[in-house]
Image (tube, rainbow, N blue to C red):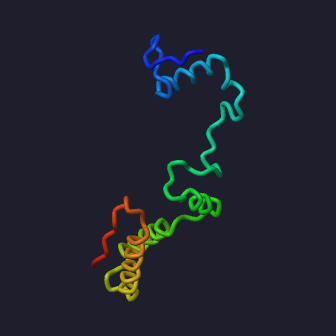
Amino acid sequence: MAEEKPGEKGKPEKFSVGWMEEIIQQSMRRGDFDDLPGKGKPLDLERDEPDPYAQGGSWIVNRVLRQNKAAPLWIELEKAIREDREWLETHAKDHPDRQARVTELNEKIMLYNQNKPSSVVDKVRYRE
């Protein structure tokens, strides 16, 4: 059987998106996908397989954190920073613990900025 040339008989070029789509449509018409495991069920996004979009093996880190119900350090710090800011908003400026809390909050902000992904905006230090 002779190999078809690109564009011959209106068929898409081999290995093009149109060619792959044609193969998938033919398989669907034949019923090749009718008895797949999990048909009609939601996708399991908590799978143990590597995420093809994760960079540098981060999928394994995310998997371990998820299995242990933990979050990355920068996420935990974000929560602590939010709680500290709420405390500062609800306590008077002359509260005896206030200066220590401000110092601790700014240390958390510095650590957060060092550990967050580069695509996340830095947090600004707290100033009275």
Foreground of the two, 70 or 26? 26
Residue under the image location 50 percent in, 24 percent down: 14
**64 left or right of 73?**
right
In percent of width and height, residue 106 lies at 36, 78
In percent of width and height, residue 9 lies at 47, 10
Foreground of the two, 55 or 48? 55
Name the quadrant of the C terminus. bottom left
In percent of width and height, residue 100 lies at 39, 86
Identity of the residue furthest to the front in this view: 2
Q: Quadrant of residue 65?
A: bottom right
99 in relation to 105, above or below:
below
Name the quadrant of the N terminus. top right
Foreground of the two, 125 or 21? 21
**15 left or right of 60?**
left
In percent of width and height, residue 5 lies at 47, 18
Residue under the image location 65 percent in, 52 percent down: 48
Q: Quadrant of residue 41?
A: top right
Foreground of the two, 18 or 11? 11
